[in-house]
Image (spheres, helix red, strand yellow):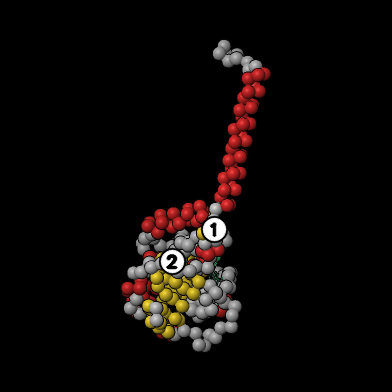
């Protein structure tokens, strides 16, 4: 035995045990108090305020790092699933007349343009095969076709509008709605989509027109677009109001 090493007296052992337990209880106590404090904080759009602040800080960091040159990975044509899983049908339930559908493009309050699907199909088509990711934790490689949002902006003279901060999209019945930063909307992989696997979109996947935006999680890929508008303030967002991240970037 090392000479410097001494046997602990029972008194010392008791003292050390006492100190160890005191720290353990202080730690547990502050964890419980902290947890209770967190849950007494007011809600901010469905999330507890301190957590919402973390989400908003993340948005600030990731939106400033966002680059048009950063692309979502694309896949070869033999990989997409023939019948991808359908998820989320908010805004798709109500009676909907496919024959009279028009896209409502709100260029400014009181200045709305109605656009038929054939006009949209007449623009240059862009296809994308990418890994569609839902925040629920699943993903699937899917194949979409439509018009680049940036091409649509050019065609309809929406330069000023696209320089505003956000685009808002909603279903014809306004049951589902999303707000998206215009940097992401103008990304070359963002499309107003009317085809899946080379065929018109199935009804439950957004016929006649949906958004495909590979730089975002699934919640932002609104199916069955009724209205598109622009704003410098965050447009209402269905899942944001229920506590999710507004930005939802990938
Ligand atoms: N109108 C509408 N669009 C929606 C949703 C919805 O509930 N209603 N759910 C979103 C979510 S959470 C996902 S993951 C994708 C799923 O797209 P899919 O059904 O084509 O797989 O659609 C998004 N778009
Ligand atoms: Mo999702």
Label drawn at residue 43:
1
Q: Residue at x 50, y 88 (%)?
A: 100
125 displayed left or right of 197: left
Q: Residue at x 57, y 61 (%)?
A: 136
Instruction: Please provide percent x and percent y for residue 128.
Output: 45, 70
Residue 27 visible? The answer is yes
Q: CA distance from mark 1 to mark 2?
A: 18 Å
Judged from the image, the secondary structure of the residue bearing numbered disc 2 is: loop
Q: Is residue 158 above or below residue 181?
A: below
Q: Quadrant of the N terminus?
A: top right
Q: Residue at x 58, y 69 (%)?
A: 87
Q: Residues within 10 Å of mark 1 (few under 14, many from 20)?
A: some
Instruction: Please provide percent x and percent y for residue 178.
Output: 48, 69
| Residue placed furthest toward the right | 10
9 displayed left or right of 132: right
Mark nearer the N terminus (1 vs 2): 1
Residue 144 visible? The answer is no
Judged from the image, the secondary structure of the residue bearing numbered disc 1 is: strand
Q: Is residue 13 above or below residue 181?
A: above
Q: Are the residues at dot 1 and dot 2 in contact (C-beta closer than 8 Å)?
A: no
Q: Quadrant of residue 167?
A: bottom left
What residue is shown with label 2? Answer: 234
Q: Is residue 85 above or below residue 209?
A: above
Q: Residue at x 55, y 86 (%)?
A: 97
Residue nearest the observer in this picture, 244 or 37: 37
Instruction: Please provide percent x and percent y for residue 191.
Output: 43, 72
Instruction: Please provide percent x and percent y for residue 62.
Output: 41, 56
Q: Nearer the viewer, mark 1 or mark 2?
A: 1
Assess mark 2: CB under 8 A from ligand 1?
A: no
């Amino acid at each position: 035995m090392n000479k410097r090493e001494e046997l602990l007296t029972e008194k010392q052992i008791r003292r050390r045990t006492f100190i160890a337990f005191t720290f353990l209880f202080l730690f547990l106590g502050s964890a419980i108090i902290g947890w209770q404090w967190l849950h007494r904080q007011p809600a901010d759009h469905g999330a507890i305020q301190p957590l919402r602040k973390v989400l908003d800080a993340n948005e600030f960091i990731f939106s400033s790092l966002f680059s048009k040159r950063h692309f979502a990975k694309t896949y070869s044509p033999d990989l997409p699933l023939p019948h991808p899983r359908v998820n989320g049908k908010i805004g798709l339930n109500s009676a909907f007349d496919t024959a009279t559908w028009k896209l409502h493009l709100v260029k400014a309050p009181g200045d709305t343009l109605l656009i038929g699907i054939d006009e949209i199909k007449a623009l240059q088509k862009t296809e994308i095969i990418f890994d569609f990711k839902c925040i629920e934790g699943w993903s699937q490689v899917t194949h979409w076709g439509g018009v680049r949002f940036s091409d649509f902006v050019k065609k309809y003279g929406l330069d000023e509008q696209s320089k505003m901060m956000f685009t808002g999209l909603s279903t014809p019945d306004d049951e589902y709605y999303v707000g998206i930063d215009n940097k992401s909307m103008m990304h070359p992989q963002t499309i107003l989509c009317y085809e899946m696997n080379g065929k018109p979109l199935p009804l439950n996947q957004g016929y006649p027109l949906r958004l495909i935006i590979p730089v975002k999680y699934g919640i932002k890929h609104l199916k069955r677009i009724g209205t598109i508008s622009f704003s410098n303030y965050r447009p209402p967002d269905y899942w944001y109001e229920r506590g999710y991240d507004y930005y939802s970037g990938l």
